[in-house]
Image (tube, rainbow, N blue to C red):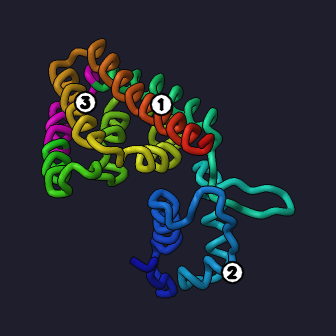
Amino acid sequence: MPPGDLSSSSPTRPDQLLERLQQAIVEGELAPGQKLREAELAMTYGTSRGPIRDALRRLEAQRLVTTTPNAGARVVALSEQQLLELYQVREALEGMTCRLAAVNMSQAQIDRLGALLETHEKEIERRAGREYFRQHGDLDFHYQIAVGCGNQLLATAVCSDHYQLMRLYRRKFSAHRGRPRRALTEHQRIFAAVEERDGELAEILMRRHISAARRNIERSIERRAKDEAK
């Protein structure tokens, strides 16, 4: 679907542009390592170069874009080592958010989390298990847990500092056969621990969940290396 024209005035126009560029990067329309030319983006998104420049600065703060002097902006492309390090950070941060969420989430927040998983389950079945339901913010299981953990610094680290970069690579490596349904089962077990207010178990299960995703990435890297060696 084309990005659409953003030329009409709107109080949320900069945020709309930012979100569309985020989505283009996360969904691979703007590929890792791709050079981002302001003039081309301005034409594609129906705006001027000034808003594009501002959006690229915000994307750089979100770690989705890298800027090099005299070379301009490119979509982020993590090395294999950087990617595995990102998942190690995720495991530590999100394990702790889960432990705290089990203690601090209100019953209303827990109810919303349960309802969200029911929606995810229906969407996975509708897509015949080919992919997980990928939406961001309040429609994201990991995001809701972080918001409900009760620790603002930790929530910011998960929901702001690393969130868009995590979205990018979660999406990229979540489409492997069987992984969406396994991920849902892991989410359901985590939710059960949170609902029981068992912070220790919730942390263990979240760590295992992210560790499983990291191992999935490691296997992908190994298969690619073998293919390239043939």
Tell me if I can see residue 127 in this picture.
Answer: yes
Question: Amino acid under label 2?
Answer: Ala
From where the camera sits, is residue 18 visible? Answer: no
10 Å crowding of disc 2: few (<14), some (14-19), many (20+): some
| Local secondary structure at mark 1 | helix
In the rendered structure, the answer to whether residue 5 lies left or right of residue 59 reads: left
Question: How far across and down, in percent of the image, does residue 213 sit?
Answer: 40, 33
Q: Which residues are magenta?
A: 102-116
User: Distance between the Cα atoms at labels 1 and 3?
Assistant: 16 Å
**Mark whose residue sits in front, 1 or 3:** 3
Residue named by callout 3: 186
Q: Position of residue 48 (x, y in %)?
A: 63, 83
Residue at the spot of label 1: 90
The one of 186 and 200 positioned closer to us in this rendering? 186
Q: CA distance from mark 3 to mark 2?
A: 44 Å
Q: Which of 63 and 97 lies nearest the eye of the viewer?
A: 63
Image quadrant where one finds the N terminus:
bottom left
Query: In the rendered image of this protein, does residue 108 appear above or below residue 37?
Result: above
Residue 221 on image: x %, y %: 53, 37
- Can you give x and y, in whole percent of width and height, for residue 200 in the image? 30, 12
The residue tagged with tag 3: helix, strand or loop?
Answer: helix
Between the C-alphas of marks 2 and 1, the distance is: 35 Å
Q: Which residue has dot 2 on it?
A: 39
- Residue at x-position 20% and y-position 26%: 189
Q: Earlier in the sequence, mark 1 or mark 3?
A: 1
